[in-house]
Image: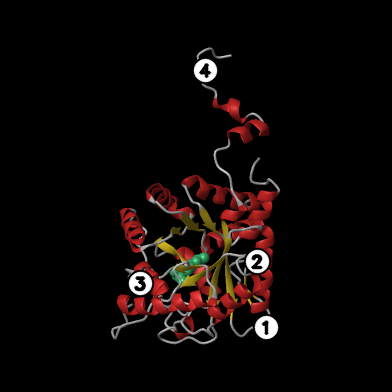
């Protein structure tokens, strides 16, 4: 025995009971949000090749999935729509009969307030050019013309029954314009989950397949440069001033530093999005037998919690909720 060794942190690691006693963070099913895709004009759910286990839902299979979410006790769903036809201004987004609004209405009718409905507020799924906004005559994304559409889209989503809208397009002023439009239309209770620090990331690759994206090029004139951190704190200040009820950082794992800094500075709840490419990487490695899929997923979710996230969007939300119930996250 070494007499000089007084501090022995291993004392607190020696048994499951001791580790449970001193565990600093916990995962909760109610903090998890499942992103889901609903596609117009299909009669069977369509698998998404780059995201094993994730599908584009029909309206009926979406309802079944939502029921499973309620049973699993997760925090809610984030709904994305995949329309049959697209045009330059993304008309399907503001049309009450557009797939996203139809699906939202169906879920709200079916489940009322039993499931929190978060709805993606962005044009990229609805535009034929695939950008998150409308274009000017030189083909550039026109910020202020886009804001006008976002305002109408927010009202259409609120009318359909959204509890929370999630503007993900990274237009300047989007939160203020959406808040104003919602309040004017009598939807002061509809909350805004702002995509505050959203980076121009290659990790969104599989999502583009999931929403049949027609994007050529990239989103670097509106999403953030991966090199920047201070800029996220500026975006946070702006979104808070504009009335964001919750803020999000995205992607997750490659941007844990951003999450931690935003969580430290934010006066409102902070969400993180474990995006499609992160999910795909875990699936691919697990399929090779190179990693233990379930443990890796739980470890990534814990890293978000440790970094300060209050809310976690993940394609594994349903499974993770089950694992947490079984105590698999705490060994
Ligand atoms: C835009 C949007 C994207 C994602 C969520 N909202 C795609 C993009 O910005 O290109 C990506 C989510 C993921 O990769 O899982 N509506």
Q: Earlier in the sequence, mark 2 or mark 3?
A: 2
Q: Look at mark 4 in the image and give the residue it sits on.
A: 6
Q: Nearer the viewer, residue 221 or 307?
A: 307
Q: CA distance from mark 4 to mark 3?
A: 59 Å
Q: Is residue 213 visible?
A: no
Residue at position x 66%, y 76% in the image: 45
Question: Which SS class for mark 1?
Answer: loop
Split into 4 quadrants, where in the image is the C terminus? top right
Q: CA distance from mark 2 to mark 3?
A: 37 Å
Find residue 177 and name its label. Answer: 3
Q: Look at mark 1 in the image and give the residue it sits on.
A: 43
**Residue 161 on image: x %, y %:** 54, 74
Q: Which label sits in the foreground, 1 or 4? A: 1
Q: Earlier in the sequence, mark 4 or mark 3?
A: 4
Q: Which label sits in the foreground, 1 or 3? A: 3
Q: Is residue 6 visible?
A: yes
């Amino acid at each position: 025995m070494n007499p000089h060794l007084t501090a022995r942190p291993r004392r607190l690691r020696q048994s499951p009971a001791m580790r449970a006693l001193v565990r600093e963070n916990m995962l909760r099913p109610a903090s998890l949000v499942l992103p889901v895709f609903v596609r117009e004009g299909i009669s069977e759910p369509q698998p998404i090749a780059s995201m094993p286990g994730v599908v584009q839902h029909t309206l009926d299979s979406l309802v079944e999935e939502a029921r499973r979410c309620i049973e699993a006790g997760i925090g809610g769903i984030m709904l994305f729509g995949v329309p049959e036809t697209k045009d330059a201004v993304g008309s399907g987004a503001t049309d009450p009969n557009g797939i996203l609004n139809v699906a939202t209405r169906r879920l709200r009718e079916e489940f009322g307030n039993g499931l929190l409905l978060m709805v993606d507020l962005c044009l990229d799924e609805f535009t034929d050019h695939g950008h998150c906004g409308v274009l000017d005559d030189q083909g550039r994304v026109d910020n202020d013309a886009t804001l006008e559409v976002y305002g109408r889209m927010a009202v259409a989503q609120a009318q359909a029954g959204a509890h929370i809208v999630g503007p993900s397009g990274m237009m300047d002023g989007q939160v203020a314009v959406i808040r104003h439009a919602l309040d004017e239309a009598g939807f002061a209770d509809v909350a805004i989950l702002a995509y505050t620090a959203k980076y121009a990331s290659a990790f969104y690759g599989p999502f583009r397949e999931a929403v049949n994206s027609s994007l050529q090029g990239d989103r670097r004139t509106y999403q953030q440069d991966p090199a920047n951190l201070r800029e996220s704190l500026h975006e946070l200040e702006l979104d808070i001033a504009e009335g964001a009820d919750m803020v999000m950082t995205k992607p997750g794992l490659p941007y844990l530093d951003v999450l931690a800094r935003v969580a430290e500075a934010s006066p409102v709840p902070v969400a993180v999005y474990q995006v499609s490419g992160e999910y795909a990487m875990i699936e691919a490695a697990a399929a090779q037998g190179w990693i233990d899929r379930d443990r890796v997923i739980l470890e990534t979710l814990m890293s978000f919690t440790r970094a300060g996230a209050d809310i976690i969007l993940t394609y594994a939300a349903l499974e993770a909720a089950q694992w947490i119930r079984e105590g698999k996250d705490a060994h």
